Amino acid sequence: MKKKLNILILSPRALENGRGGEISSMELAAGLQKYFNVTFFDTNRLFGKKLLSKEVINERLKDIKTKGRLRLLNLKIFGRQFGIPNPFDLIRFFNKIKENDIIYYSTSTVQFDLIFMIFSLVHRQAKFVVGYRKPLHSDKLFSLYNIRYRLSILFYSLFKKRIYHHTLSYNAKKFLEQFYDPNKVKFVVHGIDLNKFSDDALQMKNERFLNFIYIGYLDDVHKGVNVLVEGIKRFLEINNDPKVFFEFCGMGPLESKIKDLEEEYPKFIKFNGYVSNELVPDYYKKSDVFLFSSRVEPFPRSIMEALGANLLVLCTKTIGSIELLQGKKFAFFVNELNSEAIKNKILEIYQFWKKNPEDFKRLQVKAKEFVFQNYSSSIELEMFKEFFDNISRI
């Protein structure tokens, strides 16, 4: 009988953060457990409020027998948070690494990247896989974000013998192939758990109103929420009593902006605050159009979940959204992120819904069919299994 590979997966942030990266790492670990012996580690690096409880985390990882945490000493320098591994924990963590054949880690900080490069030199029997789950660059050429990624790429190009790279999109793969051996850069479909969307969401929608929904972090720097709010205000100002409703779910620095909008237009706006990950599908299912206003996004999980619940998508042009939705009639792209473009696109979708309700519903059906055929978590897990099996034989 073939011996199972030992795989270690590290989430560079505390699972209690409850963002997309943490959810994806838990789903990956739990899914791969049926093929491999999986060890799972996270850190104590927490940003803001805890969004996942220990009970929820334990339930998601209940089949993982070996779990641990790499504790970091959190320092604030010039207002920025830095995590330095506790030396004793680092030794314990390395001892765990030595027990595994493949180590998977999502790149996050230069410190962690350097640690993994050193580990790859010391533990020569293992293969190390670096996952790229965030945008590989920002629009600001000399930003700390860009400098950090360029440093990581430089380091990994020097320490490359046992290091492989995983991307969520073809665009990211092509970009990294400029610096690494193309045979060591692997694109794996980013899938979602479609069991949460297997019921008929069309039966849950209110046909008397067109329901728009935003679910995500409430900021403008990354998510463009301030521009989105201004676009919605413009739409409501020029339309007399439209049959629409806008819901917002999330938390972040622009919560007060959403509350002010709700207070100004209580008939058309509802702010639900933070919604737990388990309840998110229910909010999608009762909605018709997903509002995606991100400025930069590598491969948007939120859009896939929205499609799974029969939503059309109003979206900005990011690398991920273009790769996922280009040419799809259920996607309504805004050419530029500004309030006028948002207002016009909302109006376009609203008029389409009023004049062609049956065509609108047909697109909702196609949206769900598309994501079910191409982006299930089972497809992602099979691709990861093949990837890990192949590199283990090299």
Image (tube, rainbow, N blue to C red):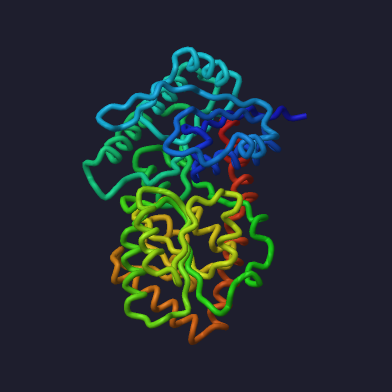
Q: Quadrant of the N terminus?
A: top right
Q: Is residue 164 visible?
A: no
* Location of residue 256 in the rendering, given as x and y in whole percent from the top left corner: 36, 54
Q: Is residue 159 left or right of residue 50?
A: left
Q: Going by the picture, which residue comes out furthest to the left?
A: 142
Which residue is painted at 42% across and 24% down in the image?
117
Taking 208 as reference, is 156 above or below it? above
Q: Is residue 376 left or right of residue 49?
A: right
Q: Is residue 16 visible?
A: yes
Q: Going by the picture, which residue comes out furthest to the right?
A: 1
* Location of residue 285 in the rendering, given as x and y in whole percent from the top left corner: 59, 64
Taking 118 as reference, is 338 above or below it? below
* Location of residue 147 in the rendering, given as x and y in whole percent from the top left corner: 27, 36
* Location of residue 8 in the rendering, given as x and y in whole percent from the top left corner: 58, 28
Q: Quadrant of residue 374?
A: bottom right
Which residue is painted at 68% across and 27% down in the image?
65
Which residue is painted at 43% across and 20% down in the image?
85
